[in-house]
Amino acid sequence: MKSVNAIEQLVSENNQLAKHAIHVHKFGGSSLASVECIERVVNIIKNHCKINDFVVVSANGKTTDALVNIYQQALDVSSELEASIEALQVAQRLLINTLLKSHSAQLITLLEQDIELLKSWVVNTRTNDKHIAKNEANILALGELWSARLLSAVLSERVCPSYFVDSRDFLVVNNDQDCVVDDSLSQQQFSRLLQGDKLAVVTGFIAKNAAGYNCTLGRNGSDYSATIVASLIGALNVTLWTDVDGIYSADPRIVPLARKLNRLPNGVAKELGRLGNPVLHAKTLQPLENHSTHLHIASSFDPNTSGTEVGRFGQIAKSELSVTYLNDLIIAKSISLTGSYGEQAIKQFSAICSDINAGFIVITQNKQKALSQWLASHDTEVSFTPVSIIAIVGHEVAKHGDVKARFKRALKNYQTMHLVSSTNEHSLIAVLPHVCTGETVNNVHHDMTKDARHIGVVIAGVGNIGERFIEMLPAQMDRIPALENVHLVGLVSSKKAIISRDGIDVTQAYELFQKEATPYKTEDLLSWLANHPYDELIVVDITPSEDFSLLYQEFFEKGIHVIGANKWAASSSTEHYNQLLNIAKKNHCLWLGNTTVGAGLPINFAIDNLLECGDSIKEISGVFSGTLSWLFETYDGDVPFSELLTLALSQGITEPDPREDLSGRDVQRKLLILARLAGFELALEDIDCQNLVPRPLQEISTQEFLDNVEQLDSYFADKLEKANSQNGCIRYVAAFTCDNNKIKAKVSLEILPKTDAFANLTPGDNIFKIISQCYQDNPLIIRGAGAGRDVTSAGLHSDLAIICKRLAHRKQPVKLKGIQQ
């Protein structure tokens, strides 16, 4: 396992790289489809681009479709041709006039010149067959040219100096079928076109072939253009800004329950593109194979949502599975498709899948004629059958027998001709003798990916209880199915932290923290949390820190769930508490805090259950402090109270400053938390709190207090004597009542009868009494250890299991604006 990185080092290094690295941003046609869309793109460029970055663009909206239609109308001698050209010109003129001020006249003039060229190409297409192919490329190139020219002019007017680059002036490919780049010549020509301290806007989709003619890179080829540009300049990152916020475990138009894949290994992404993923162009990743460039897919319609990152990752990313499919395929079977001839055919016809031992390859239907002619030279018979494929794609899935077995089970109700592995072993492909339907894809996706949801856990607080929580984690993850895909990804103390996107070994987590944790800043932590690569992220707050609790709002705003033993947030001001609840609800965040009161005791669950069954709570009372429980169950007057307190301090029963316990503030907060949980709105100041520390001892240092602790003795001796005279005892009691909508709440030292339920506890126990509509004559009593590392850690693990079960089947909405067909 790789060494775990500290947050500060991770974030600061990335920030430093970002200052010097060149980034390529590609915007697809849907991202540039209208004035509103282009305005959105301009804002993205403002927020995400630096002056020496590169922007690659597709044609605006459906412009390429319109140009294809015009070309086809020219071939068919359609009477609608002139109207189609006019409509296209009007649409482009509208974009220019709406978006530009000073540059509009210049671009309108250039547009009119291009329209005249378009008309001349149309005439040539109609009258001269030898110009048809060349004219098609000329016509289709106009969309990207107009788009780049317009965006560059808008940026120059509003954002920064900009220039546009026509990729036909530098990009050379062998032909428009293979589109293999002449890297040396392309790089040489590109370098001559670059201008310093200006933002370059480059046309996607178009290039020149080896003969010097214009050509295109195929539909969705602008993605390929972007990665070509990245390879030529050695960019650190490429972001494909599109109409969906990432790559999903299946086409989300077909599978509504598809989940976003936050990170994909390069080889897996390439295989997905090859097998029909609607976001990835088949050739997109080829230029990056020999570079360390990372590819990002993000939504221009929701730029603040983390997308999908493609690159080199560890085991968590490698465990992802996707389902993809292709229809309109042909399976060809022939004796000539075995052995070395079969290998030649696989390469020459870009076979989807094959078996050279069985003598078959699966190809797209448009290659049937070429394959038939190739086989004719071998003078052998061949059979062609229409087929489809459905595939499971993941890192080296072909090596995993359990995945193959699950795939076979998922296909048991479907007729399958062949089940083969891809040569790169990143996919298992089933050949079907019929169309692969949406129902088939949904069913197979459900069976293959239902348990694949990844949940990251960050533990804040690695002290006594935090250490025990970590110790218990490996066994819990093995025992509880809901924790199967939970990954410990961060450990944070008040001053140090370690973070690992690929997970921290839970069996060595505490030791790794001791060895590798380094200082961090709060903004570094928040930066990492905002860009985590998991389906869900949970922060387990085991700190006593008020400052850390103030981060909850930012956690919820980022969609991060919280499990808290920390009482500060749940007992904060009414305004802040309600604000946290509203923000958590708005962002679909879960906030569990069952260990804020009673450690592992199910008091919070009991209150929840009563309310869920329609009961109404009238009273909550009890002994809520394990420390004060121990002190007053043990104190019998044989030794002075100060000696008993000093003994409790030495045994770790009290806080390092015992006044924290004696002040009653902890009990006051616990009572507030329970009252709020029961549905009552009140603040801390609404609860009377008796401080057991005399006023002269409240403001001095801890050591001064301990030096004068005997000043407590007379008060508690008098209180005990009074209790004994009444055949009673003294207990520090919390009590909340609501009678006829009148609320009373206080925490105080009380004299109780020895027969009272609160009088006979095991020292250190908590006890809770609930009186409700259902529990009036015979109150509900919950009693047990209310403090301690084991019971508190167990309570936290209970919350973790609950929250993971709730999240297991949650599906984030797909932010889809219409993936290009």
Image (cartoon, helix red, strand yellow):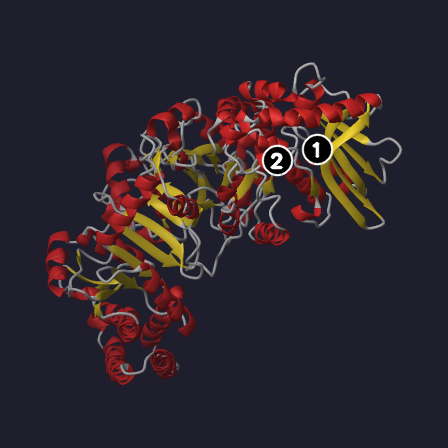
Q: Quadrant of residue 58?
A: bottom left
Of 171 and 772, which appears nearest the observer? 772
Say above or below: 732 vs 641: below
| Mark 1 residue crowding within 10 angstroms, few (<14) / some (14–19) / many (20+) | many
Q: Residue at x 40, y 67 (%)?
A: 40
Say above or below: 722 vs 415: above
Q: Residue at x 40, y 45 (%)?
A: 522
Quadrant for the C terminus in the image = bottom left
Quadrant for the N terminus in the image = top left
Circle 1 SS class:
helix
Give coordinates of residue 515: x percent, y percent. 34, 26
| Mark 2 residue crowding within 10 angstroms, few (<14) / some (14–19) / many (20+) | many
Give coordinates of residue 712: x percent, y percent. 64, 27
Residue corresponding to mark 1 = 603
Give coordinates of residue 307: x percent, y percent. 41, 51
As shown in the figure, which amino acid type bears the numbered disc 2? Thr
Q: Is residue 801 visible?
A: no
Farthest top residue in view: 638
Residue corresponding to mark 2 = 596
Q: Quadrant of residue 399?
A: top left
The earlier-in-sequence mark between 2 and 1 is: 2
As shown in the figure, which amino acid type bears the numbered disc 1? Ile
How many callouts does the rendering have?
A: 2
Say above or below: 216 vs 573: below
Of 799 and 135, which appears nearest the observer? 799
Give coordinates of residue 35: x percent, y percent. 40, 74
Circle 2 SS class:
loop
